[in-house]
Amino acid sequence: MRIVLQRVKKAKVKVNQETVSQIGKGLLILFGVEKGDTDAEVQYLSKKIVNLRIFPDENEKMNLSVKDIGGEILVVSQFTLASYVQKGNRPSFSHAMEEEGAEKMYERFVELLKEEGILVKKGVFKAHMEVELVNDGPVTIILERKANSKQSDPGK
């Protein structure tokens, strides 16, 4: 599972020129699911994200979570995060989870974030979307969790 997380002042998703979701201060999450990913990865990453201290405190140190600041989250499914480009110049998507399973994981991820008491909005699964954002910082973090992995941080 791969996630690109961006701290934003605001973000929105459009489908066919129409805004379908928007948030104020919080997190924009691009969510990609790979074959073999399980509910354990979804649970781990949802818990990690809501508690990730990447918002500034009164001393401008990254010390507060989206939960602490009462922020919002916008989750956008993005199967291209499961791409690999080791061979040739065209990305391979053979590691991406099949559509039905990926959509279930996406919905489960959103559900778990909501259970943490956070206002969560989402894009439209499998739609061609335009994503607009004002990145705050900029702060962009890549989270990855492999099935059966004990750690998400390779350095630990």
Image (cartoon, rainbow, N blue to C red):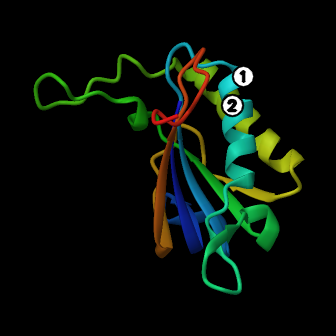
At 61% from the left and 76% from the top, the residue drawn is: 61
Between 49 and 27, the one lying in front of the other is 49
According to the image, label 2 marks what residue? 42
Residue 152's spot in the image, x, y percent? Answer: 55, 33
Give how far across and how far down residue 33 sits, in percent: 53, 28
Q: Mark 2: give few (<14), some (14-19) or many (20+) Cα within 10 Å.
A: many
Is residue 67 or residue 134 the one in the foreground?
67
Residue 127 shows which numbered tag?
Answer: none
Identify the image quadrant of residue 64. bottom right
Q: Does dot 2 land on a helix, a strand or a loop?
A: helix
Circles 1 and 2 in contact, beta carbons < 8 Å: yes
Q: Nearer the viewer, residue 111 or 127?
A: 111
Q: Residue at x 71, y 56 (%)?
A: 121
Disc 1 marks which residue? 39
Badge 1 density bin: few <14, some 14–19, many ≥20, Cα 10 Å: few
Q: Residue furthest left?
A: 88
Residue 140: x and y, percent? 46, 60
Amino acid on which the number 2 mark rests in the picture: Val
Instruction: Residue 142: give x, y in percent of width and height.
Output: 47, 47
SS at circle 1: helix
Q: In screen coordinates, is 120 left or right of 21? A: right
Residue 118's place in the image compared with 115, above or below, is below
Decide: is 153 above or below 100.
below
Q: CA distance from mark 1 to mark 2?
A: 5 Å
Viewer-side residue, 122 vs 86: 86
At 19% from the left and 25% from the top, the residue drawn is 86
